[in-house]
Image (spheres, grey):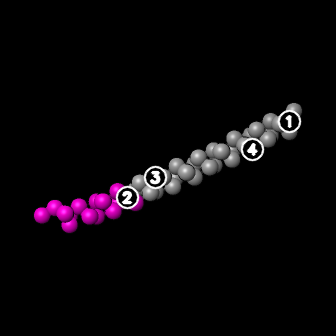
Amino acid sequence: MLAIETNKLMCACKYAGILLLWGVLTISKFRLVCCFLYSNIPRFTP
């Protein structure tokens, strides 16, 4: 019984880690795009 619970916990931790990593990557991409857009704004505006 304990082995099954431990296995479930490890699976949950693994998925949480993957989700966290995915979230961090998504946020960093979003920030990179925002920085790129904001840096290009002065060039387009007269």
| Local secondary structure at mark 2 | helix
Residue located beneath label 1 in the image: 2
Residue drawn at 28 percent across, 59 percent down: 38
Q: Are marks 1 and 4 in contact (CB under 8 Å)?
A: no
How far is mark 1 from mark 4, CA to CA?
Answer: 12 Å
Q: Are marks 3 and 4 in contact (CB under 8 Å)?
A: no
Residue drawn at 59 percent across, 46 percent down: 19
Q: List x then y, in percent, for residue 17.
A: 63, 49
Q: Earlier in the sequence, mark 3 or mark 1?
A: 1
Q: Earlier in the sequence, mark 2 or mark 3?
A: 3
Q: Which label belongs to residue 28? A: none
How far is mark 2 from mark 3, CA to CA?
Answer: 10 Å
Q: Earlier in the sequence, mark 3 or mark 4?
A: 4
User: Residue 42 magenta-drawn?
Assistant: yes
Q: Earlier in the sequence, mark 1 or mark 4?
A: 1
As displayed, is residue 29 above or below residue 7? below
Give the magenta part as a residue range: 32-46
Residue located beneath label 2 in the image: 33
Give the amino acid at mark 3. Ile
| Local secondary structure at mark 4 | helix
Mark closer to the observer (2, 4): 2
Answer few, some or many: residues within 10 Å of disc 4's Cα (few below 14, many 20 plus, some between 14 and 19).
few
| Local secondary structure at mark 3 | helix
Q: Are marks 3 and 1 in contact (CB under 8 Å)?
A: no
Residue located beneath label 4 in the image: 10
How far is mark 2 from mark 4, CA to CA?
Answer: 35 Å
Q: List x then y, in percent, for residue 34.
A: 35, 56
Q: Which label belongs to residue 27? A: 3
Our reading of the magenta stretch's main secondary structure is helix
Q: Earlier in the sequence, mark 2 or mark 4?
A: 4
How far is mark 3 from mark 4, CA to CA?
Answer: 26 Å
